[in-house]
Every structure is written in structure tokens, then in C-alpha cells.
Image (cartoon, helix red, strand yellow):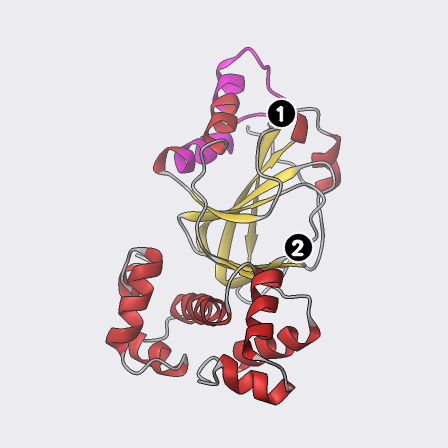
Amino acid sequence: MPYYFQTLEEMERSPVPIACHATDYAPGSSTGTHRHPFHHQLIYAVHGVMLVASDGGQWIVPPTRGIWMPAGTEHQVRHIGEVRMRSLFVRPHAAPSLAEQAQVVGISPLLRELIHAAMQINIPYEADSRDGRLMRLLLDELQVLPVLPMHLPSPADPRLQRICGHIQRKPEDQATLADWARYFEVDPKTLQRLFLRDTGMGFARWRQQARLLQALERLAKGQKVIDVALALGYDSPGAFATMFRRQFGQTPSGFFR
């Protein structure tokens, strides 16, 4: 019988360079804030949608996507619907060139099947064996993961934190950067510079990203496209669908198929 790690402590003690771990979660559950000090983690759900948060921002992770979480990064995973998670745990010395920042990545059909096969491998495995070669191929595939634009960075400036918090609570609000500048009694260019400094994107781009990620969460819960579009402040479902396709390359209705 394949052997699965029962606890994270057991995972930390394992000498293997890469291993797979399966966990199923109930709808609405959360992992709580935690970190894996000795392992990178590829968080991937074969079913369900995950909302991942850390000090660096938020990511929404639907099926066919995963999130790369470097070792030592504190994070929390909230589960939208029933989630069947299959995580890869990678010791940093086994793949020193992998990304050092959290990011959403694409999961290719090959990588998906390799993860499925890794779940059937006994731990520990011999490096010079079929199982060891399969796990090395997994490491090779991790080197070429495509990065996807599904990150919502968190600003450090208190004024921007208030703006961003308001947008996330009321994404339909059409207040402009000039409106916020008047509220804080500063030049709009000052706020724009702060947005670029703290988040790497301008105000309009950050708000669009916040709306799109909320759209993914709402769609994952089964809300209709027209209801999502109106709730997020778009004039019509068509305008929303155009923006969605431009960002993700698919229609809202087809994204989760």
C-alpha cells in the first residue's frame, strides 16, 4: 500500500527531496495561518477553489491552477466549496532555482498526471528507481511552471490600505483616484506613485484585479455571470465578460469547466 504522511511533523523529518500529500477539506473551512520552514509547497486542488492569503497579498486558485509557496512563508488557505488538495513538498536544496516568491501557476496535464502518480509512491523511495525517476521528472516540471496574473498585492501605506479595504468590501463603488485624493487632501499623482511603489500597479489596475478575483470567488460559488457583473460595478455582463476574457483568456462561464 502507498504510504502517506500523516502529519506535517512527519513530513519535515522525511529525507526525500520531494513528496506528495493529500488532504480533503470541507466547504468554508480554513487551514489557519501556518508555514512550512523546511519545504517549498505547491498547493494544488484537484477539486474545489482555494483563497490563499499571506502578508504579500491574496491569490485565488481554481482547479487547473496551483500556488507556489516558498519555504517559511506564512499563509492561510480558505476553501470555497469542497476542496481535495494534493500538495507537493519540496526541499529547497532539491530545486535551488525555483521561485522565491509566492505565485499562482498553471498546472499542465502532464504535471497533473505526475501528481496523481506521486500519490501512489511509497515513502521513502530509492533515487535510482522508477519511483525516484518519476519524482525527479516532477522536479523538472516545477522548473517550467507558467506564472499567472492572479495576485492581489497588499499595500503598506495606511491610506492605500483604507482605499483597498473599501474596494474589497464594496467592489461596485466607482470612486476614482481623484475622488480619493480629495478625501485624503493630497495630489492624485501622490496616490498613484504610492500604488506603484507598494503594489507594482496603478490604482485602476489594482481595482480591476480586485474585482476579477472577487468574480472568480463568486463564480466558484455558483453565482450567475449577470449577478456577478452587476455586483462588481460593471455596466453589463458583456463588459464584464470582455474584461474577464482579456485577463484570463476564457469566458466567465467557461472558466471552471
Note whether 179 is above or below 228 in the view shown.
below
* Foreground residue among 221 and 56: 56
* Foreground residue among 22 and 94: 94
Residue count near mark 2 (Cα–Cα under 10 Å), binned few <14, some 14–19, many ≥20:
many
> Where does the N terminus fall, quadrant-wise?
top right
> Where does the C terminus fall, quadrant-wise?
bottom left
Check disc 2 and report its element: helix, strand or loop: loop
Q: Quadrant of residue 145?
A: top left
**Residue drawn at x 48%, y 26% as measured from the top left:** 140
Give residue 184's position: percent from left, percent from top: 64, 85
Note whether 217 is above or below 109 in the view shown.
below
Q: Mark 1 highlights which residue?
A: 94
Does residue 121 show up magenta in the picture? Answer: yes
Left or right, 105 with reference to 54: left
Q: Amino acid at mark 2?
A: His
Residue with the most extreme top position? 128
Q: Cα distance, mark 2 to mark 1?
A: 22 Å
Note whether 139 is above or below 112 in the view shown.
above
What segment carries the magenta color?
A: 111-134
Residue 77 visible, this orientation: no
Give residue 135's position: percent from left, percent from top: 52, 24
Residue 240 visible, this orientation: yes
Q: Mark 2 highlights which residue?
A: 75
Does residue 118 show up magenta in the picture? Answer: yes
Mark 2 or 1, nearer chain start: 2
